[in-house]
Image (cartoon, grey):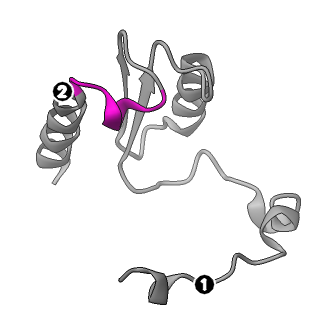
Amino acid sequence: KYYKFIIPESKKALWNLFSKNAKINFRKKHVPLFFISCSEDQIIPPKLVHWNFRKHRNLHSITCYKDFKNKNHFVILHPEWQEVAESVTRWIEKVT
């Protein structure tokens, strides 16, 4: 039933990453961001997630970070996925 909503990806998506429009002003105020890493993630390592968190953190915006121990990139398939979902829910309630 969802196939009718699928559209082809833009062939320019990757090319746009290298344009001046892709530049991020990290000092500019932004929407609240919650960076989540998992200690066993081999695809997006926690160091990379934490680096992004530090880059986006500024005095004008809400930016939070949490590392979940003993979980990996496929956290939604992990038996304890609810721990992550509850953390996200609490964060959303806190910032809204």
Query: Is 47 placed above or below 14 here?
Result: above
Residue 7 is inside the magenta segment: no
| Amino acid type at mark 1 | Ile
Question: Are the residues flagged by discs 1 and 2 in contact, CB closer than 8 Å?
Answer: no
Query: Is 49 placed above or below 30 here?
Result: above
Residue 83's disc is 2
| Amino acid type at mark 2 | Glu
Residue found at x 19% / y 47%: 92
Q: Earlier in the sequence, mark 1 or mark 2?
A: 1
Q: Residue 61: percent from the left, percent from the top? A: 39, 46
SS majority, magenta:
loop
User: How far is the residue under mark 1 from the one under mark 2?
Assistant: 33 Å
* Residue range highlighted in magenta: 73-80
44 relative position to 76: left or right: right
Secondary structure of the residue carrying tag 2 is: helix
Secondary structure of the residue carrying tag 1 is: loop
Residue 84's disc is none
Residue found at x 53% / y 23%: 50
- Mark 1 or mark 2, whichever is nearer to me: 1
